[in-house]
């Protein structure tokens, strides 16, 4: 008999009628010959209301008590859902996280799942019950109630589907699937039939609010196909699996993170460990940093720019003030009126000219790009907030995202799992033995055939990046990593990129030729650089990876010249002579996490 996990989000259980409608769906699935586990969130905005209440009695409620409080939201909805199933004449049993054996660590309000013991759920299912499981919660070794972080019911659902080896995991929500961008921002956004785990992970972490990103890490790790669909109809939704919707499209979706702020620390002594110190101080204050761009500067000093969420700017500024003194940097600037626009697609890893196309789209809309970072499946640019919507639209149009690709997958049946029997045994062993959400790296590698080119002190104007990469591309040079950042100088910018070493001389010639036309003050380069990469799943929810890399490299005396981060990998560029040394230090640092 097949086993289906159905998750209903807060809006799908917001009132008694909706609860009854969800109960009917579960019953229908059972009557279709399946065993059914239903995972529910708190009704409507109940979690928000509970947080409000907490703040009325305490400005900084203790995290343990917060979890005690928040878990009640889901306890209400599981009980009501079970009653609803009974009233429709079927058997159901509701279970809290503790009752169903979801064991977590003790990080209250953001606990990670360690193990799930599925025996009790199995027994109840075998006895003909629909099992109603409380989302978002678990229990730690001491028996304390924990919660998994906002939106964590998705993670409960996918984790249960993994632990029970479910045939399907349906996420029933108030939208009918995943769109090429948020339809509230662009009405021309298109519903996708399918999206890959990697693409969904990137989009989720870029603020495409459809799913909790940790749930996608689970799905990828344990090979759980997810079907995101509307709880108010039976139409086909979006499948999240290993493969993209179209095997040939470079870009599958675009996203905008509206409220970002940029911080540039100027004149940081360019010695091993300076970025480490800066980002450690920020991490200590639990400030998430993004779009880290470090540019090679003059007189052995570098500028480091990064973005934080606007609401964290104040906290971050305080940290940076101290860091400037500590590091002996010359100063810092901030801008709180910026937004990040990104495109994502597995296909861009295999195609050239994708970044250039994005820069062109933004330039043609007359919008200036303030910062750029690229990774293998994502390109992000920072623009003025007032122009972010226009930039998103321009990019969405440039990649024709509103039109279904000709080779888009059309599916009618849910896929079956592809994991081989040995994989399954291994996975099941893991489920009992190891932390399900533990950081797992697939490989640490060195590619030592690259060169770096840097243009500094370039007057910043719309179209600059587009023109530079046009010229480089027409010379047939293959560009890999690109970063652009703000210089300390007013209105000036720097662009660094990596290319194959064999094209270095040729590329330098092209760039020298651009100097006059674009008033580029300085062109520098390094013929012998290499890239060190750490790959795995969900590296951004494990922020310790980037810091750990900086840490290992700094202790080995290796200076980091460029960095990029994504969900799939963290890459750093270092001088070639440090490659082997750097690689060894990373392998040692992450020995425990390597598969
Ligand atoms: N009720 C929790 C929240 O609002 C968990 C969830 O909805 O997924 O964040
Ligand atoms: Mg939710």
Image: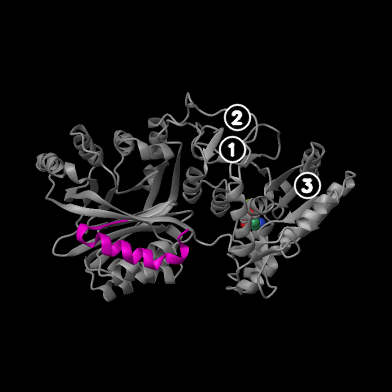
Q: Position of residue 418 (x, y in %)?
A: 59, 41
Asked if residue 132 can be seen in this view, the reply is: yes
Of marks 2 and 3, which one's residue comes earlier in the chain?
3
User: Going from the N terminus, do you reach mark 2 or mark 1 first?
Assistant: 1
Could you say which is closer to the camera, residue 466 or residue 141? Answer: 141
Label total for image:
3
How far from the left and from the top, in percent, is residue 179?
53, 37
The residue drawn where x is 56% and y is 32% is 193
Q: To which residue does mark 1 refer?
A: 239
Q: Which residue is drawn at 65% across and 67% down?
A: 146
Residue nearest the viewer, comparing 310 with 406: 406
Pointer 3 residue: 19
SS label for mark 3? helix
x then y, percent, for residue 163 = 66, 54
Disc 2: which residue: 411
Kindly indicate whether the residue at mark 1 contacts the one at mark 2 (C-beta within 8 angstroms). yes
Residue 47, by quadrant, is bottom right
Residue situated furthest top in the rendering:
406
Q: In this view, does 182 lie above or below 528?
A: above
Instruction: Please provide percent x and percent y for residue 245.
Output: 51, 33
Instruction: For mark 1, give the secondary structure.
Output: strand
Find out whether residue 415 is within the magenta segment: no
Other residues around mark 1 within 10 Å, as few (<14) / some (14–19) / many (≥20): many
Specify the quadrant that holds the N terminus. Answer: top right
Dot 3: few (<14), some (14–19), or many (≥20) neighbours within 10 Å? many
Position of residue 150 in the picture relative to residue 80 (left or right) = left
In three-dimensional space, the C-alpha distance between marks 1 and 3, rounded to whole angstroms, equals 24 Å
Magenta stretch: give its range.
572-595
């Amino acid at each position: 008999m097949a086993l289906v996990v159905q998750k209903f989000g807060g809006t799908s259980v917001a009132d008694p009628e909706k609860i009854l409608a969800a109960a009917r769906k579960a019953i229908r699935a059972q009557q279709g010959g399946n065993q059914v586990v239903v995972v529910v969130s708190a009704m409507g905005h109940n979690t928000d209301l509970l947080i409000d209440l907490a703040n009325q009695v305490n400005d900084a409620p203790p995290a343990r008590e917060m979890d005690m409080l928040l878990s009640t939201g889901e306890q209400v909805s599981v009980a009501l859902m079970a009653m609803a199933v009974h009233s429709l004449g079927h058997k159901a049993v509701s279970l809290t996280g503790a009752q169903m054996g979801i064991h977590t660590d003790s990080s209250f309000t953001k606990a990670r799942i360690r193990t799930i013991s599925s025996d009790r759920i199995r027994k109840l299912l075998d006895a003909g019950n629909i099992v109603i499981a409380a989302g978002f919660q678990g229990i730690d070794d001491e028996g304390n109630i924990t919660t998994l972080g906002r939106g964590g019911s998705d993670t409960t659902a996918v984790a249960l589907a993994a632990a029970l080896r479910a045939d399907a995991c349906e996420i029933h929500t108030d939208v009918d699937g995943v769109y090429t961008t948020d339809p509230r921002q662009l009405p021309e956004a298109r519903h996708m039939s399918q999206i890959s785990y990697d693409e969904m992970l990137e989009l989720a972490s870029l603020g495409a609010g459809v799913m909790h990103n940790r749930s996608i890490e689970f799905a990828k790790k344990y090979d759980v196909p997810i079907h995101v669909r509307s709880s108010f109809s039976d139409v086909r939704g979006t499948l999240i699996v290993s493969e993209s919707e179209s095997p040939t499209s470079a870009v599958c979706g675009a996203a905008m993170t509206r409220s970002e702020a940029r911080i540039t620390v100027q004149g940081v002594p360019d010695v091993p460990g300076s970025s480490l110190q800066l980002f450690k101080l920020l991490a200590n204050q639990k400030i998430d940093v993004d779009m880290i761009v470090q540019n090679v500067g003059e007189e052995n000093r570098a500028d480091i720019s990064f973005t934080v969420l606007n609401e964290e700017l104040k906290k971050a500024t305080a940290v940076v003030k101290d860091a400037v003194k500590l590091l002996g940097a010359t100063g810092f600037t901030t801008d709180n009126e910026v937004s990040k626009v990104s495109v994502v697609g597995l296909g861009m890893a295999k195609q050239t000219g994708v970044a250039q196309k994005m820069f062109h789209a933004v330039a043609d809309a007359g919008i200036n790009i303030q910062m750029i970072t690229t990774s293998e499946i994502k390109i992000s640019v920072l623009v003025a907030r007032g122009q972010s919507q226009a930039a998103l639209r321009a990019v969405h149009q440039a990649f024709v995202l509103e039109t279904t690709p000709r080779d888009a997958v059309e599916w009618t049946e849910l896929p079956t799992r592809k994991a081989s029997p040995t994989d399954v045994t291994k996975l099941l062993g893991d489920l009992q033995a190891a932390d399900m959400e533990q950081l797992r790296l697939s490989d640490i590698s060195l590619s030592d055939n690259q060169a770096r080119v840097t243009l500094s002190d370039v007057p910043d104007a719309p179209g600059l990046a587009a023109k530079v990469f046009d010229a480089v591309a027409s010379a047939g040079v293959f560009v890999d990593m690109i970063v652009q950042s703000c210089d300390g100088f007013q209105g000036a910018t720097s662009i660094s990129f990596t290319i194959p070493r064999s094209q270095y001389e040729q590329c330098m010639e092209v760039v020298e030729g651009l100097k006059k036309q674009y008033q580029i003050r300085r062109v520098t380069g390094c013929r012998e650089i290499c890239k060190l990469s750490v790959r795995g799943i969900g590296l951004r929810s494990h922020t310790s990876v980037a810091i750990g890399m900086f840490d290992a490299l700094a202790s080995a005396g290796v200076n980091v010249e460029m960095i990029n981060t994504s969900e799939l990998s963290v890459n750093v560029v270092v001088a070639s002579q440090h490659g082997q040394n750097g690689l060894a230090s990373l392998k040692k640092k992450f020995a425990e996490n390597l598969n």
